[in-house]
């Protein structure tokens, strides 16, 4: 609103700049001849000054004076044959009106094409000072970074920022942040495990000796810390110690609580390891949540985690709309909806799946059977 | 605020359209009211452009990344100064600065032009309006600095690290003041062509404008040269780079214009030639803008290459240069030619100056454009470099430099060359002495160097001789001489100072090129080396964290003859993470007029580092000479006679009875 007000004021000022001289009294200005005469008179005065200072010889001065006088005389004769202006008043008036109108028309017309009047200015300082609830993740991070740049000894700040870096994939910065947090706030199992994870992710998933040390420190502080156990087992796989990795995972599964988010990745990893041990071709890992997604989910608040899962389910749903001939996809979607407690969506997904696959095809029958095991029937 | 700036820019464009048509029509039809529109519109247009520029600058200062231009060229951690200078450290912003200065000059003409003949003033403002409209349209259609970005990123991409320097605060504004200042001369020339007559006031007005633009351009070029010298780390001060040439050509033409304008003002001669020069000078400025902005040349100046921009500027270029030259061809015949004069006279020497300077400008033009044309037509890439320019340009400059001291000593209309030569005997003797001293005591083989130094001394002493003669030192009692000296008009001082400055620059160039010593070596911490008899010790590299960069600082110590540490020189290599770009920061120590220049190369594995070290004797004189030239121009500007005779202003003085009667 303020913008439109100022814009209107500016337009008014600009239009007045055109209008005022047009509306003003026509003053009969001196002709060019008078100006020329004035210039020559100045030159004469200057000549006199120079002569008085002795800068030019008296004879030269006399000659110059004569020269200027000649020009003045010539000027007089020019003046007499001054051209007569033919000014058509009506043309001039309409030009004036057009000029005054052109200013608002052109400016508002052009601005409406080019401008974005509804976007306010966004100075960085104000953006960082606004209510955190309205900020995007990037803004929150920038805010924290700005704070930490000024107070690098704020351990809590690093502690908060470290898992966020990890989640958005800025692994190197996550490593630094975890190190700072540990240095300033002391070592805890979560921080050490986070550090190890950050180092691992920064190295594209290779669990280095440095990372292993971090996980081991975490386990010393908390005996059953699942993240550290999982990654140490992964390290065993990477070292070729498949057997030991499998037993590590088995032991882990035995002690994990039933609702732990680590259950399914561990199960998947164990299954894969066992396949490798039996020499069976390594099946492509189920296209479930990626490892990173799971790690991220582990470090989230329950609400965030739910939101994240819902996004993933929605993504899967969308994918199946575009490519519906995917039995496994439909099965996963169905299970997901039931886990989330969305029974209506589950029913709808079942119906859509049967339609897409065809009720009489092998895939369709398989899907219906799968639904039956979950307590859903396709017959409605 | 951002959108207000955008709107103000659009509004300024609308006003420039009015300014380019209404006063012109008024002048053609003799309508006073229509002519009067030019003034207020020019002033308001400047106000709006300034508002627009301020809006962009404040977006930069506040790191408003919702503006694409700010996001692309700024960073929240940059020091405040670079946030501000970043406003014009990019294509869009620099074009906005260009029109800001253009409208500023237009407003000045409007404000101080009350004493100009009304039609001349209206025409001048209209031509300024054309230039303004063309460039506003260019900005709004191809290079809009106010384009928004939603959602706004949280961090910018940083200003080009090479530009993160105080130089950016000085060099472009000065250069643009120079370039665009010549637009006023151009407008006056075209206005005179439209009117078909050259008023006496015309001659008086063109000279101060040329002078002002020339002073700024001189400063801009000198600053640019010094900046390149210390920032690029090669220790060179002039590369005959096309971008440098682009600013040097208007300077040469402008210098010629400056001198021919004197003849026109004093003697009413060379009118048509001066007019043509005014057109050519601004045309070369436009050409410079085209070369630099279109992306034809890749350099630090070509911020972004976008063919549509190049074509647009090419159109502007063709329209204005072609149009004005066509108008010149049509109208020049009907203009009254000026008086005639003897070849041996002040006028004659100035004509000679003009001939040489325009030829030199043409040489540089050919050397700059030929490779581009060749590449465009045949695809062959050649580079025309220093050897070509040194040979052609140097050869053209020697006679000019030799003749400079004669010019001011010759009388108007008919001069006496022998009398002038006689008076210059002292200067000639001094120059000869300088040549002999150089050959005998410094370097027996350096004949050309000695001659160069001789010419430099000749220029300096010649300028001083002029002052001494005009104040009558030696002919009249000392007291009279002093009072005469003090009373000399500013233009005489200006001439002498500017010519002296040229001599200093020449001395600096010859000395720095011929007598510099260079060392390139690998140094370990603790190593010492010697350059031009000075012992320098390397103390090792130390990391340092800047606001938006990290750097390795090499510490060098100049060891005195007594073995004690005398001076510390810090030379560093920086890394700007936002752009992933390294820069070198040369370490420079000025001693007297000479400089020790240390530049860091690659680091070796064992802590050693490649070091380039120069001793550059008298090198600062190159730029100090430029400053002295600027002072000369400014002194000349203050001269009373540069003010225009004004009927309107005179009438305010009741004592002045001889007021011209209005007809």
Image (cartoon, grey):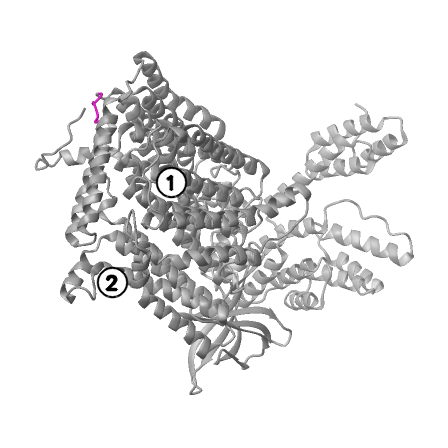
Return the residue at label 1: B274
Residue B409 drawn above or below residue B339 = below
Return the residue at label 2: B468
By secondary structure, the bulk of the magenta-drawn segment is best described as loop
Answer yes or no: is residue A266 visible: yes
Residue B358 appears at what percent x and percent y? 45, 47
What residue is rendered at 70% in x and 29% in y? A344
Q: Picture quarter containing residue B113?
A: top left
What residue is rendered at 77% in x and 44% in y? A287
How crowded pointer 2 is (Cα within 10 Å; few <14, some 14-19, many 20+) is rated as: some
Tag 2 or tag 1, which sits nearer the N-term?
Answer: 1
Residue B295 appears at what percent x and percent y? 57, 44
For the record, the magenta segment spans: A26-30
State the mark number for residue B446. none
How crowded pointer 1 is (Cα within 10 Å; few <14, some 14-19, many 20+) is rated as: many
Is the residue under label 2 in contact with that under label 1 (CB below 8 Å)? no
What residue is rendered at 49% in x and 74% in y? B555
Q: Quadrant of the C terminus of chain B?
A: top left
CA separation in Å, label 1 and label 2: 31 Å
- Left-right relation of B627 to B160: left
Residue A30 appears at what percent x and percent y? 21, 27
Residue A265 drawn above or below residue A347 = below
Residue lying furthest left: B655
Task: Name the subunit of mark 1.
Answer: B
Q: Quadrant of the N terminus of chain B?
A: top left
Residue B74 drawn above or below residue B112 = below
- Left-right relation of B41 to B303: left
Query: Toward the viewer: B166 or A257?
Result: B166
Residue B165 appears at what percent x and percent y? 45, 57
């Amino acid at each position: 609103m303020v913008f439109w007000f100022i814009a209107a004021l500016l337009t008014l000022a600009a239009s007045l700049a055109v209008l005022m001289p047009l509306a003003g009294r026509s003053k009969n200005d001196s002709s060019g001849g008078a100006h020329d005469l004035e210039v020559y008179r100045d030159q004469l005065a200057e000549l006199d000054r120079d002569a008085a200072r002795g800068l030019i010889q008296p004879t030269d001065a006399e000659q110059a004076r004569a020269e200027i006088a000649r020009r003045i005389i010539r000027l007089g004769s020019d003046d007499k044959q001054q051209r007569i202006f033919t000014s058509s008043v009506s043309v001039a008036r309409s030009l004036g009106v057009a000029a005054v109108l052109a200013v608002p028309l052109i400016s508002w017309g052009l601005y409406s094409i080019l401008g974005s009047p509804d976007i306010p200015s966004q100075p960085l300082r104000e953006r960082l000072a606004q209510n955190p609830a309205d900020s995007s993740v990037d803004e929150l991070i920038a805010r924290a970074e700005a704070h930490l740049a000024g107070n690098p000894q704020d351990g809590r700040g690093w502690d908060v920022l470290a898992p966020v870096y990890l989640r958005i994939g800025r692994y190197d910065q996550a490593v630094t942040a975890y190190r700072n947090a540990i240095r300033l706030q002391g070592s805890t199992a979560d921080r050490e495990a986070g550090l190890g994870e950050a180092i691992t992710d920064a190295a594209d998933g290779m669990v280095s000796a440095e990372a292993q040390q971090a996980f081991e420190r975490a386990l010393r502080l908390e005996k059953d810390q699942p993240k550290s156990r999982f990654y140490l087992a992964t390290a065993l796989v990477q070292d070729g110690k498949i057997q030991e990795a499998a037993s590590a995972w088995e032991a882990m599964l035995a002690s994990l609580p039933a609702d732990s988010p680590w259950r399914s990745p561990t199960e998947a990893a164990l299954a894969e390891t066992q396949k490798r041990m039996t020499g069976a071709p390594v099946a492509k890992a189920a296209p479930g949540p990626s490892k990173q997604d799971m790690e991220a989910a582990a470090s989230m608040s329950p609400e965030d985690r739910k939101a994240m899962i819902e996004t993933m389910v929605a993504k899967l749903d969308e994918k199946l709309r575009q490519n519906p001939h995917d039995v496994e996809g439909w099965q996963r979607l169905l299970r997901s909806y039931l886990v989330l407690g969305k029974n209506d969506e589950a029913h709808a997904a079942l119906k859509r799946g049967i339609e897409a696959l065809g009720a009489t095809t092998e895939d369709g029958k398989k899907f219906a059977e799968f639904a039956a095991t979950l307590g859903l029937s396709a017959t409605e | 605020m951002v959108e207000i700036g955008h709107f103000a820019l659009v509004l300024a464009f609308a006003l420039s359209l009015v300014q380019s048509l209404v006063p012109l029509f008024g002048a053609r039809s003799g309508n006073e009211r229509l002519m009067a529109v030019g003034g207020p519109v020019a002033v308001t247009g400047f106000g709006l452009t300034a508002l627009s520029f301020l809006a962009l600058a404040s977006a930069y200062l506040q790191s408003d990344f919702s503006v694409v231009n700010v996001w692309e060229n700024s960073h929240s951690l940059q020091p405040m100064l670079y946030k501000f200078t970043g406003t014009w450290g990019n294509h869009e912003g620099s074009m906005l600065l260009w029109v800001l200065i253009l409208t500023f000059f237009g407003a000045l003409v409007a404000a101080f032009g009350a004493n100009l003949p009304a039609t001349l003033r209206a025409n001048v403002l209209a031509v300024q309006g054309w230039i303004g409209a063309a460039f506003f349209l260019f900005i709004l259609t191809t290079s809009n600095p106010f384009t928004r970005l939603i959602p706004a990123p949280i961090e910018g991409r940083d200003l080009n690290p090479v530009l993160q320097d105080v130089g950016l605060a000085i060099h472009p504004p000065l250069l643009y003041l120079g370039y665009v200042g010549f637009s006023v001369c151009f407008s006056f020339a075209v206005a005179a062509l439209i009117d078909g007559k050259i008023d006496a006031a015309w001659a008086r007005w063109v000279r101060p404008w040329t002078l002002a633009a020339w002073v700024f351009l001189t400063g801009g070029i000198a600053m640019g040269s010094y900046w390149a010298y210390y920032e690029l780390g090669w220790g060179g001060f002039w590369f005959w780079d096309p971008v440098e040439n682009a600013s040097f050509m208007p300077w040469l033409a402008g210098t010629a214009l400056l001198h021919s304008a004197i003849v026109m003002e004093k003697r009413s001669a060379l009118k048509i030639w001066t007019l043509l020069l005014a057109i050519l000078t601004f045309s070369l400025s436009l050409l410079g803008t085209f070369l630099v902005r279109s992306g034809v040349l890749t350099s630090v100046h070509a911020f972004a290459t976008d063919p549509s921009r190049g074509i647009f500027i090419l159109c502007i270029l063709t329209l204005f240069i072609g149009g004005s030259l066509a108008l010149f061809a049509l109208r020049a015949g009907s203009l009254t030619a000026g008086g005639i004069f003897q070849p041996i006279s002040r006028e004659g020497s100035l004509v000679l100056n003009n001939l040489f300077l325009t030829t030199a400008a043409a040489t540089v033009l050919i050397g700059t454009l030929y490779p581009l044309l060749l590449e465009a037509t045949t695809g062959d890439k050649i580079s025309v470099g220093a050897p070509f320019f040194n040979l052609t340009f140097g050869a053209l400059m020697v006679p000019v430099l030799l003749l400079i001291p004669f010019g001011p000593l010759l009388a108007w209309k008919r001069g006496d060359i022998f009398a002038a030569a006689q008076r210059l005997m002292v200067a000639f003797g001094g120059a000869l002495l300088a040549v002999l001293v150089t050959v005998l005591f410094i370097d027996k083989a350096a004949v050309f160097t000695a001659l160069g130094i001789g010419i430099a001394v000749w220029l300096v002493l010649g300028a001083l001789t002029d002052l001494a003669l005009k104040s009558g030192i030696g002919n009249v009692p000392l007291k009279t001489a002093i009072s005469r000296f003090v009373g000399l008009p500013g233009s005489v001082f200006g001439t002498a100072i500017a010519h002296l400055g040229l001599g200093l620059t020449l001395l600096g160039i010859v000395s720095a090129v011929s007598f510099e010593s260079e060392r390139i070596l690998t140094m370990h911490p603790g190593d010492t080396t010697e350059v031009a008899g000075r012992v320098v010790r390397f103390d090792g590299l130390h990391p340092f964290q800047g606001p938006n960069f990290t750097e390795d600082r090499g510490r060098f110590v100049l060891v005195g003859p007594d073995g004690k540490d005398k001076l510390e020189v810090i030379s560093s290599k920086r890394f700007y993470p936002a752009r992933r770009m390294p820069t070198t920061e040369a370490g420079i120590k000025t001693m007297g007029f000479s400089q020790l220049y240390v530049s860091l190369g690659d680091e070796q594995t064992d802590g050693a580092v490649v070091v380039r070290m120069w001793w550059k004797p008298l090198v600062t004189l190159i730029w100090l000479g430029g400053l002295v030239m600027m002072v000369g121009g400014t002194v000349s500007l203050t001269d009373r006679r540069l003010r225009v005779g004004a009927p309107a202003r005179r009438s305010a003085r009741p004592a002045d009875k001889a007021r011209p009667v209005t007809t």
